[in-house]
Image: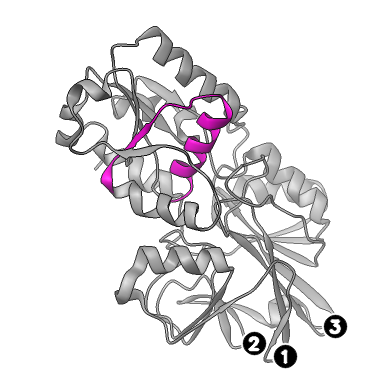
Amino acid sequence: MPHPESWLKVLPQGLYCEPGGFFVDPLTPVDRAVVTHAHSDHARRGHRAVLGSADTLALMRARLGADGARETEQALAWGEAVTIGDVRVWLQPAGHVLGSAQVAMEYFGTRAVVSGDYKRVADPTCAPFEPIACDVFITEATFALPVFVHPPPEHEIVRLLDSVALFPERTHVVGCYALGKCQRLIALLRQAGWDQPIWLHGALLALCAVYEARGIPLGDLRPATGAAKGELAGAIVLAPPGAVTDRWSRRLVEPVVGMASGWMRVRQRAKSRGVELPLVISDHADWNELNATLDEVAAPEVWVTHGREEALIHAAERRGIRGRALRLVGYGDEDEAEIAPR
C-alpha cells in the first residue's frame, strides 16, 4: 500500500493530493480546492472549483462576495463520499466553526485525514469533532504547549455576566473574531440566560445573518453603530478585536474592555491591549485535547501543519507516534492575527 508521503505533497500552494489533483486549503488560487472551513487563512479567493460543506460554501460566499467567485462549487454532506481522480474523499465535522470539516482521503488502502482547525468542547453553533481512524493524521498545533489548558467556556461567560452585574452602569465590549467566535459567544450568553439585546459592531452583522439563515438561532441582535449612548449602558457589545479600543468605542459608556481568545491565557497579551476582562474562550483544541485526539484517531504517524509543532511532535514521539512538521506558511490563529499589536 502506498504511504501517504508518496501521494500527499507540500508545494508552494499548500498540501497537494497528487492522485486526486486537488489541494487542501490552498494558499494561492488553484484549479481544484477542498476547503476545511471559511476562515480567511484557509478559504481564499480565486479557485476555479471548490469542494466543502454547504455551510462553509455559504460563509465563503458571504465573506468573499463576487471577487471570490468560483466557476464551480460542490457541497458534501457529512460522510458523503466522492471519488476525485483515484482518491475517495469525504468530510466529517471538525467542531471549529459552522461548517468546519476534516478532510478524509483514501488511496489504495491507505487513509490520511486533514483536521483543519478544530476544537473538542461542545459548541452550540457547530457540529462536534468526530475522530476518524487513519494511517496519517494531519493536525494543527495552535495551542500545542502545556501552558495552554482552556477553562470551560461556561466559566468564562459567568465571569462576563458577573462583571455586568457588578458594573450595571457601564458598557461591556468584548473583542471577538467575526466568524465563529462572535456567534459562539452569543449562543453561550443565551444558554446562560442572557435574553437582553446583544449589540454588534457593523462588521459582525453579515456573518451572524448567515448563521441564522443556516439554522443557528442567535436571538435579539442590534447594531451598536448609531445606537443612543444611553441604550448601551449596562449592555453587552461585541466588536472585532481591533475596534474595542479605537475611536469607534468612544460611543460606549465607560466601557469595560474584554477579549475572547485562547491567547488571553497569556497575561501580557491582555495587558498590552488594555484588556480589563480577558476571557479564555478558544475555538482551537488545547494541549490536552490535541494529545487526546492523537490517541483517539490511533494514527501511527502525525503531520503538523502549523503552530507549535515541536512540542506536539515531541509528545507524540514519546508515545511511539512518528511526527513530521510540514511548516506550512500562511496559516495562523485568526484571533492571534487580530490581537497581535500593530
What residue does disc 2 label?
Answer: 20
Q: Residue at x 67, y 89 (%)?
A: 19
Q: How many marks?
A: 3
Q: Residues within 10 Å of mark 2 (few under 14, many from 20)?
A: some
Q: Quadrant of the N terminus?
A: bottom right
Q: Position of residue 272 (x, y in %)?
A: 30, 28
What residue does disc 3 label?
Answer: 1
- The residue closer to the viewer here, 159 or 132, is 159
Q: Position of residue 25 (x, y in %)?
A: 51, 70
Q: Residue at x 29, y 49 (%)?
A: 203
Q: Which residue appears farthest toward the top when viewing the image? A: 166
Q: Amino acid at mark 2?
A: Gly
Q: Secondary structure at mark 2?
A: loop
Q: Position of residue 24 (x, y in %)?
A: 56, 73
* Disc 1 + disc 2, Cβ < 8 Å: yes
* Disc 1 + disc 3, Cβ < 8 Å: no
Residue 175 quadrant: top left
Q: Position of residue 188 (x, y in %)?
A: 54, 33
Q: Which residues are magenta?
A: 179-202
Judge whether 213 appears above or below 198 on screen.
below
What residue does disc 1 label?
Answer: 86
Q: Secondary structure at mark 1?
A: loop
Q: Amino acid at mark 3?
A: Met
Q: Is residue 134 left or right of residue 57?
A: right
Which of the labelled discs sits on residue 326, or is there none? none
